[in-house]
Amino acid sequence: MYKIGGRIKMFREERGFSQKEFAEAIGQSNTTVSNWERGLTRPDVDTLVKICEVLAVAADDILDIQITSGNITEHEKRVILAYRKKAKFQEAIDTLLGLGNDV
């Protein structure tokens, strides 16, 4: 039984998508989404990217991954999570911080 489906359902409902609308938005069948949400199957990595884009949520949130390092402040955690959710700004932020293309 996979837990990712419950989180997909939670975010889908928070965003106001019906299961059918969401399935169409990510290019999957309603049955596929239903199977995820019931914990019978789970999406592949490429589909997970599309899910995150459509739901405007970070993969960490869908996967329920928590930042646990004791040396990161709450503000830094919020900055990291915001960075991950704003793909359009990541290149500009990397340039501003002098990170280049090696990240």
Image (tube, rainbow, N blue to C red):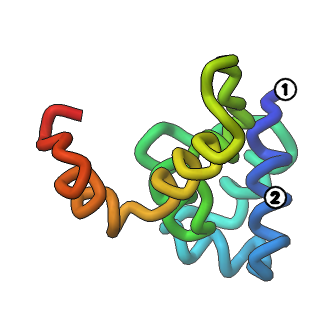
- Residue 14 percent location from the top left of the image: 83, 72
- Residue 7 percent location from the top left of the image: 80, 49
* Closer to us: 98 or 20: 98
* Closer to us: 99 or 25: 99
| Circle 1 SS class | loop
Residue corresponding to mark 1: 1
Occupied quadrant, residue 103: top left
- Residue reaching furthest top? 70
In the image, taking residue 29 as reference, residue 15 lies left or right, namely right
Name the residue at 74% across, 54% down: 8
- Closer to the chain start, of discs 1 and 2, is 1
The reply to whether callout 1 and callout 2 are in contact (CB within 8 Å) is no
Q: Residues within 10 Å of mark 2 (few under 14, many from 20)?
A: many
In the image, taking residue 95 as reference, residue 10 lies left or right, namely right
Occupied quadrant, residue 100: top left
Name the residue at 55% across, 51% down: 79
Residue corresponding to mark 2: 9
**Callout 2, which amino acid?**
Lys
Q: Residues within 10 Å of mark 1 (few under 14, many from 20)?
A: few
Q: Is residue 101 above or below residue 15?
A: above
Quadrant that contains the N terminus: top right
The numbered dot on residue 76 is none
In the image, taking residue 3 as reference, residue 22 lies left or right, namely left
Q: Label 1, label 2: how many angstroms apart (C-alpha)?
A: 15 Å
* Closer to us: 19 or 80: 80
Name the residue at 71% across, 30% down: 66
**Callout 1, which amino acid?**
Met
- Residue 20 percent location from the top left of the image: 71, 76
